[in-house]
Image: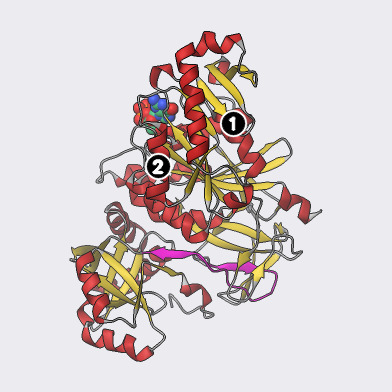
Amino acid sequence: MDIKNEVSRRRTFAIISHPDAGKTTLTEKLLLFSGAIHEAGAVKNNKIRKTATSDFLEIEKQRGISVATSVMTLDYTGMRINILDTPGHKDFAEDTYRTLTAVDSVILVIDSVKGVEEQTRKLMEVCRMRATPVMIFINKMDREGKDPFDLLEELENELKIAACPYTWPISNGSRFKGVFNLSTESIQLYNTGKNNLPEMFLNTRDIEDPLLKEHIGETNLTNLWEEIALAIDLFESFHKNLYREGYLAPVFFGSALNNFGIPELFETFLKIAPPPSGSKTLERVVLPEENVFSGFVFKIHANLDPNHRNRMAFLRVCSGRFERNKMYYHTRLGKKMRFAAPASFMANDTNMIEEAFPGDVIGLYDTGKLKIGDTLTEGESLHFTGIPSFSPEILKEVVNKDPLKTKQLEKGVMQLTDEGLAQLFVQQPGNIKIIGTVGELQFDVIKFRLEHEYGAKCDFRALPFVKACWLTSANKQKINEIIGRRAGTIAFDKSNTPVFLAESDWMLKIVKQAHPEVQFHNSSEYKAQIKTSNTDYE
Ligand code: G4P
């Protein structure tokens, strides 16, 4: 088996968006277009629907179903494409951020009516941190949205990326007809055809084609040429290298619901999106073409079957060939492990696989030995980096409601936070446990799971903090100073890194000024992965 060949034909990416921009619809249309699914609904039905916060059980149920769509693998014209799904619900944003550590590129969906939204900005921040190549799909062009020039400017200003129009919309709202492709200098006009698939009824490079006037109208056509000339003047032209370096984002216009602009997006994606490349570890850069296998865990899905407490760990293969039943080295535990039933996913199916290659994401059934950030190799002691945890926005103290079950509570809190459900910080004196999340929903989930899986009872006490910043300094003395002077607002994460808990951005600014030699970070690496003992829960 030629690993190089397997690497070069793989494309692993995520479709991301602010909730409701059209991520689910676009994913489904790409799957339909590629022939991976044959009827609409397969992805849509698995979407975590908007539910009242209190109804977290329903959300957990839906989340359970959506395990099968966590990764969608499809083959198209000799390429192996892995689409990593990200939860749309904003309370699961942390899950989405981590999924971005396992992709080689992303497609960002923007609603043409709403433009850049809160979650879009946060997601782009994570992409920028990792210099992930980004393609942008401006969706819902069938609605009376913002002007395309304004949208492109907004993307540049708010997302801090050079926007390069790759296609240009022909009108919008009810007059939206199709797109002009600036790369091929051709026009594609669409209809929705059989089986709800896009039907291109005109694809021409001849600007005198009489059908153009007939379908677009003379005035609209004149406007189109003027707009395109201006767009070429105002925005960067496409350069594959700049895109792959994460500096420039090609922008596509369309309507996922009506299938407009999907083929341009997908075919360009296949042409320009990068295959897997080198991954950083603490020790060295691992190249995908290397003969020996390595990979890391970026997501854990628990509660597949509450009776057996089993979980599925999602592993991204970074180099070599993964084989079923082969012994692999778990670098954090210093132990060998074997996986008898590794799984791959497609729409509603989970299939056992015999092998996997760089770029692939596989599901490993686990009984609690794997944590986010864990590395598996063929024996080399490697630790993949770049799997950060981000500052939580809600912080609450765990209040033990049943002193007889303290041990169970401690174990539960440790394990649930290992899954990435929330973050754990400990404050001294008193060993106070603080849970940090990006959404309220997680507190309901933790409380419920502690009770039902560990037999422990707890409540949460609201704390006045809105942010946690990890502290570092070249001068250790300065860290000790801040810990000593601000004990009430200092806690420690699981790897014992000090964290400053801020009550407001204003307070954070004041404290930063008071401690100029200390750096305050909004994210931290999962340092827990470099521990080598197995004494965590004992
Ligand atoms: P998400 O995964 O990003 O949260 O968005 P999703 O695809 O579920 O789309 C959100 C809503 O926007 C859906 O409507 C969907 O039908 C609609 N939508 C998606 N693409 C387009 C488009 O190109 N044009 C227009 N006009 N609407 C679009 P909904 O009413 O919330 O759900 P549903 O009842 O249609 O399923």
Relative to 240, does residue 450 appear above or below in the rendering?
below
Q: Reading the chain from its start, which is encountered first: label 2 or label 1? A: 2
Scheme by which the image is coloured? secondary structure
Residue 256, visible in the rendered structure: no
Looking at the picture, which amino acid does disc 2 mark?
Glu
- Label pair 2/1, CB-CB below 8 angstroms: no
Measured as percent of width and height from the top left, residue 198 is found at 56, 21
What residue lies at 63% left-to-right and 19% top-to-bottom? 203
First to last magenta residue range:
372-390
Q: Amino acid at mark 1?
A: Glu
Q: Which mark is residue 296?
A: none
Per the picture, the main secondary structure of the magenta-coloured stretch is loop
> Could you tell me which residue is drawn at 50 percent across and 14 percent down?
216
Q: Residue furthest right?
A: 1
99 over 459 or under it: above or below? above
Residue 14 percent across, percent down from the top left: 52, 46
**Is residue 388 covered in magenta?**
yes
> Disc 2 marks which residue?
153
Give the image location of residue 234, x and y in percent.
Answer: 47, 40
**Residue where numbered disc 1 is placed:** 264
Ligand 1 within 8 Å, label 1 CB:
no
Q: Is residue 5 left or right of residue 179?
A: right
Is 32 or 403 nearer to us in this picture? Answer: 32
Above/below status of 227 relative to 302: above
Which residue lies at the image location 34% right of the left edge and 91% below the top edge?
477
